[in-house]
Image (cartoon, helix red, strand yellow):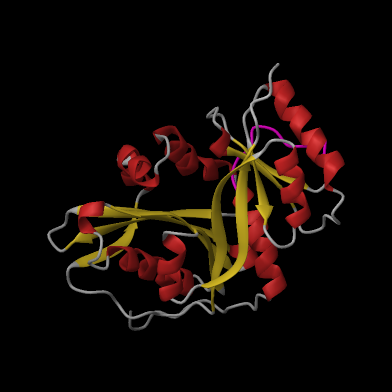
Amino acid sequence: MQGVKPLPKQEVTVDELQHLLIESMYIGAPIFQLNCAEGVLSYVSDLGHAGSNYVGFDLNNKGNYLPQVHAVIELFKSRKIPFCWICEDIREAKLALILGQLGFIKSYVFWGMSYDRCRLLPGSNDQVFAEEVSVDLLQQHAQTIADELDCSVSYVEQTLRSLDYVNEEKLRAYAVFLSSGEVIGFALMIEIPNKSVALLRMAVVLPKYRGIGAYQALFIARMLDAYLSGLESVITYAYEGTAAPILEKFGMQKHQRFTMYQAPEYKQ
């Protein structure tokens, strides 16, 4: 990388990172906005299952949850759309109790994490290498990615095309290869230039090739590009029992713990 200079960086405060970790979950192309409830963020796809439709409060909510929760429930119920609610564990402990009383079921736990001060990191080993590829390559392997993420192929395809409708963000795709050229994993990164951060998404490595540095190679490749783009920080969401411990070893810090609650199936 001799002779390549990164763009000037901008400072990002902890408060700004926390806002970004909330807001970035809702990047994409919602089918409809939740105008019925002030301060509610939403991402609603056309896939028809709860995990691909979710809502949550922004950081400006003062804790008056019940009216907004009922308004959101009525809206999704009237449109016959299953959904989940994302709740920040500490700040929204009261909300979690309300959701439980209304029949919401705890689905899974994940962490909002960041790597501040993007920098060049040491390369991985000579067994694998990762680089940016076309989104088309990931679309060709959508079924493989879905199998490893334990989700539907429709969800993967929705994610890969959702950024088509967003002007300010830049979607970048990555693959990791064996030295022989065989592709063994994939990942995404969404650059958010006006916020000086990059959002890491959807990193998977085929089970047969785990433990040889492939996941780390995907991380390093994306960190390098974020650094060269002049972005200050990298943020991501990671499942508590799987990706989060690995990313901590790479130097990412935990900021906020979230729980996703699935809404009950309301009878029409």
| Count of numbered marks | 0
* Quadrant of the drawing holding the N terminus: bottom left
Q: Is residue 113 left or right of residue 187?
A: right
Query: Quadrant of the rendered structure where residue 221 is?
Result: bottom left
Position in image of residue 87 (x %, y %) = 68, 52
**Residue furthest to the front:** 101
Residue 94 appears in view: yes
Position in image of residue 46 (x %, y %) = 56, 29
Instruction: Name the chief secondary structure element in magenta.
Output: loop
Q: Is 172 drawn above or below residue 116 in the view shown?
A: above
The front one of 167 and 149 is 149
**Residue furthest to the top:** 268
Give, as a single range, the part of the protein colored magenta.
Answer: 27-37
Task: Identify the residue at horizontal 55%, vertical 70% (top origin).
Answer: 114
Q: Is 69 drawn above or below residue 63 in the view shown?
A: above
Residue 35 appears in view: no
Query: Quadrant of the rendered structure where residue 126 is?
Result: bottom left
Task: Identify the residue at horizontal 55%, vertical 38% (top origin).
Answer: 52
Query: Quadrant of the rendered structure where residue 211 is?
Result: bottom left
